[in-house]
Amino acid sequence: MKLSVRKLCVTAIGIALFVVLSLCLQVPVFENYYLCLGYVAMAVCCYSFGAVSGTIVGVLGVVLYCLVISGLRGLPGWALGNLVIGVVLGLTFRRTGRMKRRGPAAALNAAAILISVTAGILCLKSLLESVLYLQPPAVRIGKNFTAWIADLTVLLLSLPICMALDGVLKKRFPRLVS
């Protein structure tokens, strides 16, 4: 099978996992919010298959999830936030994956998660929603603060999963892994 077809299939599996994990494993943490475990699939794809694959998983996974659950509500901001998160994490994971020392690599990965989720969810998503819903940005930031905490938590907890699965994925898909 050609390399591009394999990469497409792996990305499609990642999108399906994002949707299934988001729909089936809902862990409530706040009044109206739950941990989006689909971010684990996105993080693994960013870590093992690169920024393009991981970003597509995050963006299209959210689009499909929103279409199944609630139509277009929440879609534009969340998808745009995942675009930022996917690009930043994919590029960071690629560079830190080459580092010999795991401690500094893990610290850089955690910093990239904090920066990307803050930029994507707390800032960009809030700004877009303030324009769409005609609300002051401070109101949207307040509403998205719980999402920021939950998404940040899931992505930080997914780092050990990414590292553990990377070795398995390198053996199974040797030419696809970044």
Image (cartoon, rainbow, N blue to C red):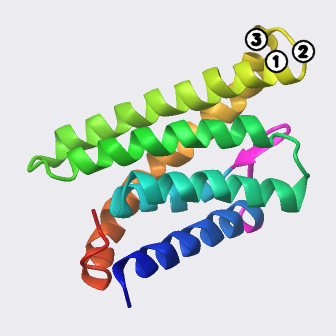
Alpha-carbon neighbours of circle 2 within 10 Å: few (<14), some, or many (≥20)?
few
Which residue occupies 28% across, 35% down? 108
Q: Is residue 26 magenta?
A: yes
Which residue occupies 90% across, 22% down? 133
> In the rendered image of this protein, does residue 100 appear above or below residue 153?
below
The residue labelled by disc 1 is: 131
Q: Quadrant of the N terminus?
A: bottom left
* Mark 1 vs 2: CB contact within 8 A: yes
> In the rendered image of this protein, does residue 139 appear above or below residue 20?
above
Segment colored magenta: 24-35
The residue labelled by disc 3 is: 137
Left or right, 121 with respect to 92, comes to: right
Nearer to us of marks 2 and 3 is 2
Of the two numbered discs 1 and 3 on the same chain, state the one appearing first in sequence.
1
Looking at the rendered structure, the kind of residue marked 2 is: Leu
Element carrying mark 3: helix
Q: Residue 44's x, y, as percent? A: 43, 61
Which residue occupies 36% across, 31% down? 111
Looking at the rendered structure, the kind of residue marked 3 is: Pro
The residue labelled by disc 2 is: 134
* Mark 2 vs 3: CB contact within 8 A: no
